[in-house]
Image: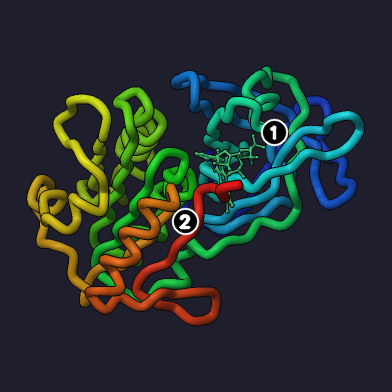
Amino acid sequence: MAVLDQAPTPVTTAPADPAPKRGGGFYRERVIEVTHYTDKLFSFKTTRPASFRFRSGEFVMIGLEVDGKPLLRAYSVTSAFYDEHLEFFSIKVPNGPLTSRLKDIKVGDELLVGTKPTGTLLADNLMPGKRLILLATGTGFAPFASIIRDPETYDRFETVMAVEGCRHIAELEFATRTVTGVREHELLAEIVGDRLLYYATVTREPFYHQGRIPDLITSGKMFHDIGLEPLNREGDRVMLCGSPGMLRDVTKILAERGFIEGSSGVPGEYVIEKAFVER
Ligand SMILES: Cc1cc2nc3c(=O)[nH]c(=O)nc-3n(C[C@H](O)[C@H](O)[C@H](O)COP(=O)(O)OP(=O)(O)OC[C@H]3O[C@@H](n4cnc5c(N)ncnc54)[C@H](O)[C@@H]3O)c2cc1C
């Protein structure tokens, strides 16, 4: 593990290929770990190109070579900027061109990783605030995994509230494991202390927090449950990543309360990224 307060100095872990090959705008990396959570969700780690830099919250094109051609899709990087590996959290779409193949990847397989990470879920796109609220559904938690692993997040905000909404309890596992990993991390734990709050909610089975994120915000229940004051424009900065329905409904709530959307170069009070595009 690299020292956390230094500028990112990624080191490739590619065992047989210390100088990763580049070509056609992507690196060719090796899968080093695969974890399946449900029949719809899995995560995987790959080697990291020595020259690959990204900012916490960014996404990059990744994929597989199929019939001699790259088949690429946008994926948020879930690992920290200082990690030696790259990590991604993925859906398995039945008959999805990429994920119907990606779900079968094994340790040692090749993964194409684009050379140009980008995205709007960046702390720089938010004005200063006291509380950072990260609202995700499903794989929308992916960029937030990287953000809550970044020590600078805790320099910028007094409290970080990570919210993951899913249909079923089993689908929360990646988010829950990531939060636990941050809280127990040998170096991060001291920086984070008790300032990382985690709120998990499900919609399709009994659980101690239930319901859709927009409803839990409107009713104030989410903040009441966690023992914090309700959403307020003055101190809260919000990042959204998830399903089109959650994004639509929460954006409406934020607009009604006067929150201003931020973008690259023009910081605001909230930023948004689609977790996927409906085709
Ligand atoms: C900015 C951005 C970041 C993304 N980051 C991630 C990520 O970190 N992890 C990830 O799994 N996907 C992510 N996606 C979606 C990803 O790019 C692909 O759509 C997904 O991997 C499925 O690819 P596919 O070729 O199998 O099916 P596609 O043809 O791409 O998708 C088929 C359909 O599956 C549904 N779908 C696609 N992705 C998802 C999803 N993540 N959750 C629920 N339903 C979905 C949609 O209805 C879509 O129309 C992101 C998309 C964007 C635009």
> Is 237 above or below relative to 144?
below
- Residue at (74%, 49%) from the top-left corner? 114
Residue 220 position by quadrant: bottom left
Q: For this rendering, which residue is in front, 18 or 230? A: 230
Residue 66 visible in the shown view: yes
Confirm if mark 1 falls within 8 A of ligand 1. Answer: yes
Give the percent coordinates (x, y) of residue 157.
30, 64
Labels 2 & 1 near each other (Cβ < 8 A): no
Along the line of sight, which residue is nearer the eye, 115 or 99? Answer: 99
Q: Is residue 65 above or below residue 228?
A: above
Decide if residue 261 is on the left or right side of residue 64. Answer: left
Residue at the image position 10 percent from the left and 61 percent from the top: 229
Res 185 visible: no
Number of marks drawn: 2
Q: Mark 2 belongs to which amino acid?
A: Asp
Q: Residue at x 57, y 61 (%)?
A: 119
Of pointers 2 and 1, the one earlier in the residue sequence: 2
Q: Position of residue 113 (x, y in %)?
A: 73, 43
Residue 103 x/y as whole percent:
62, 23
The foreground one among 140 and 19 is 140
Residue picked out by circle 1 = 98
Tag of residue 206: none
Which residue is disc 2 drawn over? 5
How many C-alpha atoms fall within 10 Å of the one at disc 1: few (<14), some, or many (≥20)? some
Tag 1: amino acid: Leu
